[in-house]
Image (cartoon, rainbow, N blue to C red):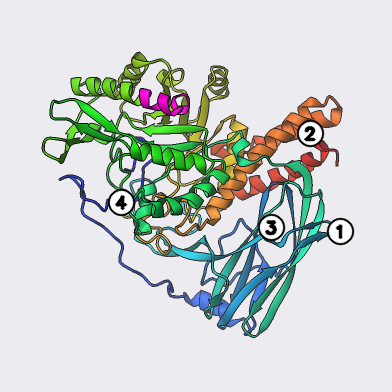
């Protein structure tokens, strides 16, 4: 699949595991490589200058600490962060040692305030960061969707679930700490001690303080931000070696989808045509609706998988919208089961063909009736992604001629001809809509979002992208007036994603944001932070607008000034972390004003 959209999003992650038709590419995989890449002479000399004692310090969530590079940071044993009630704050510890360290653990107790209030120890979640292979170094920008790097780099990204670990000699291990502030918590300042220990005893104790502000982040199901991360449930089944759509598969999907719902996901990704892209994911996106051509030439449709997945996703909290992909599959190829022969048949139906027109009229009749019976029609969008504009317009005309009630979602380049007819329009970040376009669409009840994919190199969500670029996405959406964000995939895993995020065609990590066995990632957590900031900005701005005093007016002016930094052009020359950290400082100050602290 790459090129979600002809010129834009390319769906990365080569190699279908099931033979589909004669045009399937040969399987391609990277050779296995060991994790321990050789140290340079400069890196060796940095380690030589250390004594044998392990070092521990708070680090920055904006940094990716490389496994073999001795951190050049000032030791910091106390840290203070600020968060709302209902918010998840992130903290990063760094441990490094010249000599091996066995059975390293990190423990935390309750967070307590001077007034006697406490936050439970369960609010603090500790994850050891796992390194994975990448084809680009941290901050790389010298690549395109078509280019391919043969380099190998170790990048910290996956958040592991192990209770302890060992640090080899001359290596680094980051620890990611999530602070989930209960919505019922009292505003105030809370502190706890983080204890880092090894086999022989305590290595270091560090003080972590969190200032809890009076604002409350709503439940993710009530967020205004429209998140659309595409799902590939077949990749989940394949990795865990279970048959798709069995109870074993569903039991794995439940926590996996709940994590997605907890990030504010609005769309259930469904497929009504088989492998609609180009068979270059490691596990293809199969269809959830089987097309069956009966012996008399008529078609029937099997919705059992479609219904199971929609019901499961709704059970897990993704309830707002269903996207059905797609009327325009890659190169117009489609597959159906021929009842007479018992074989699958592949054909190509261009949008202007009689076959395309007659089939889709028939399918839309049947699909609409099924959706209506299930109570899902009003929240279902037909996905029509970027193809030649005339093909897109032909498909939209057929759909709207069938029923003006159909909703359409479209991701790709901006086309003036589509602005009024697309209900949910997602543009590539470097081809933005202007304020007037977004405002007019909102007046019509339409939503407008943006996406990144294999392009642009910056900002993006690759394992090697500077982590603050994830947070930047939420601020960019708010500043530009967008309703949300799309990325093409949440979980289209490669062969061995826990150790190797590379792809044979596109930049590492392009096809997934989280890892198997319910592991999150640095980049997913930081993306989520940006979505929460979007919600906080909505609340603070609305509160300040309700006030008529000079202080509120000046606060709104200060906020507007900060938001001007969040443009695509600016982030090309200014690190995302600089804009994000300054903006968050202002947001924290304005929160105090809005809530009368």
Residue 369, magenta (yes or no): yes
Q: Name the side, left or right, on which 225 lies relative to 488.
A: right
The x and y percentages for residue 222 are 62, 35
Q: Which residues are magenta?
A: 368-379
C-alpha separation, residue under disc 3 versus residue under disc 2: 32 Å
Instruction: Report the residue marked by disc 3.
Output: 123
Mark 2: secondary structure = helix
Instruction: Report the residue marked by disc 4.
Output: 14
Q: Could you tell which of marks 2 and 4 lies nearer the N-terminus?
A: 4
Residue depicted at x 44% and y 54%: 252
Residue depicted at x 31% and y 51%: 14
Which residue is nearer to you in this view: 336 or 350? 336
Instruction: Report the residue marked by disc 2.
Output: 555
Which residue is nearer to you in this view: 280 or 117? 117
The x and y percentages for residue 479 are 62, 33
C-alpha separation, residue under disc 4 versus residue under disc 3: 39 Å
Mark 3: secondary structure = helix
- Judged by depth in the image, the label closer to the viewer, 4 or 3, is 3
In the displayed structure, would residue 294 be above or below residue 166?
Answer: above
Query: Could you tell me if the residues under marks 1 and 4 are in contact, i.e. CB atoms within 8 Å?
Result: no
Instruction: Report the residue marked by disc 1.
Output: 116
């Amino acid at each position: 699949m790459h090129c979600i959209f002809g010129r834009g999003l390319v769906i990365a992650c080569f190699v279908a595991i099931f033979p589909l038709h004669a045009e399937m590419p040969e399987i391609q995989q990277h050779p296995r490589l060991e994790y321990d890449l050789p140290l340079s002479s400069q890196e060796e000399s940095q380690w030589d200058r250390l004594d044998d004692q392990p070092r521990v310090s708070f680090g920055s969530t904006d940094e990716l600490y490389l496994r073999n590079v001795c951190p050049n940071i000032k030791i910091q044993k106390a840290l203070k962060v600020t968060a709302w009630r209902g918010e998840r704050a992130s903290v990063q510890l760094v441990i490094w040692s010249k000599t091996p360290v066995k059975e390293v653990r990190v423990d935390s107790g309750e967070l307590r305030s001077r007034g006697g209030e406490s936050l439970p120890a369960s609010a603090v979640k500790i994850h050891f960061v796992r390194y994975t292979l990448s084809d680009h170094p941290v901050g790389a920008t010298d690549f395109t969707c078509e280019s391919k790097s043969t380099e190998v780099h170790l990048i910290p990204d996956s958040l592991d679930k192990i209770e302890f670990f060992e640090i080899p000699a001359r290596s680094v291990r980051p620890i990611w700490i999530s602070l989930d502030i209960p919505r019922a918590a009292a505003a105030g300042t809370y502190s706890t001690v983080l204890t880092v220990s090894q086999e022989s005893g305590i290595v270091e104790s560090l003080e972590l303080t969190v200032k809890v502000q009076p604002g409350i982040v709503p439940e993710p199901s009530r967020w205004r931000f429209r998140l659309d991360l595409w799902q590939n449930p077949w990749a989940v089944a394949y990795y865990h070696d279970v048959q798709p759509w069995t109870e074993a598969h569903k039991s794995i999907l439940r926590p996996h989808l709940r994590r997605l719902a907890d990030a504010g996901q609005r769309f259930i990704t469904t497929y009504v045509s088989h492998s609609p892209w180009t068979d270059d994911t490691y596990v293809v996106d199969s269809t959830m609706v089987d097309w069956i051509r009966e012996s008399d030439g008529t078609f029937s449709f099997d919705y059992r998988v479609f219904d199971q997945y929609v019901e499961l996703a709704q059970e897990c909290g993704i309830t707002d919208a269903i996207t059905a992909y797609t009327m325009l599959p890659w190169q117009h190829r489609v597959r159906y089961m021929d009842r007479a022969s018992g074989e699958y048949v592949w054909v190509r139906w261009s949008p202007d063909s009689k076959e395309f027109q007659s089939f889709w009229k028939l399918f839309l009749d049947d699909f609409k009736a099924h959706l209506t019976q299930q109570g899902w029609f009003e929240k279902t969008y037909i996905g029509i992604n970027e193809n030649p504009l005339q093909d897109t317009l032909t498909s939209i005309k057929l759909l709207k001629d069938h029923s003006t009630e159909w909703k359409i979602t479209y991701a790709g380049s901006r086309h003036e001809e589509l602005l009024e007819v697309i209900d949910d329009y997602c543009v590539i970040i470097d081809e933005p809509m202007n304020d007037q376009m977004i405002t007019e669409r909102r007046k019509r009840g339409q939503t407008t979002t943006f996406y990144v994919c294999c392009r642009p190199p910056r900002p993006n969500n690759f394992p090697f992208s500077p982590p603050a670029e994830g947070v930047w996405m939420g601020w960019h959406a708010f500043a530009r007036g967008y309703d949300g964000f799309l990325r093409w995939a949440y979980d289209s895993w490669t062969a061995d994603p826990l150790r190797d995020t590379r792809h044979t065609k596109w930049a590492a990590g392009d096809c997934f944001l989280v890892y198997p066995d319910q592991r999150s990632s640095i980049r997913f957590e930081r993306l989520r932070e940006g979505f929460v900031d979007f919600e906080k900005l909505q609340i603070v701005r609305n509160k300040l607008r309700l006030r008529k005093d000079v202080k509120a007016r000046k606060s709104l002016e200060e906020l507007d000034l900060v938001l001007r930094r969040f443009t695509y052009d600016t982030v090309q020359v200014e690190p995302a972390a600089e804009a994000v950290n300054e903006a968050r400082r202002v947001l924290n100050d304005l929160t105090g004003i809005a809530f009368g602290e």
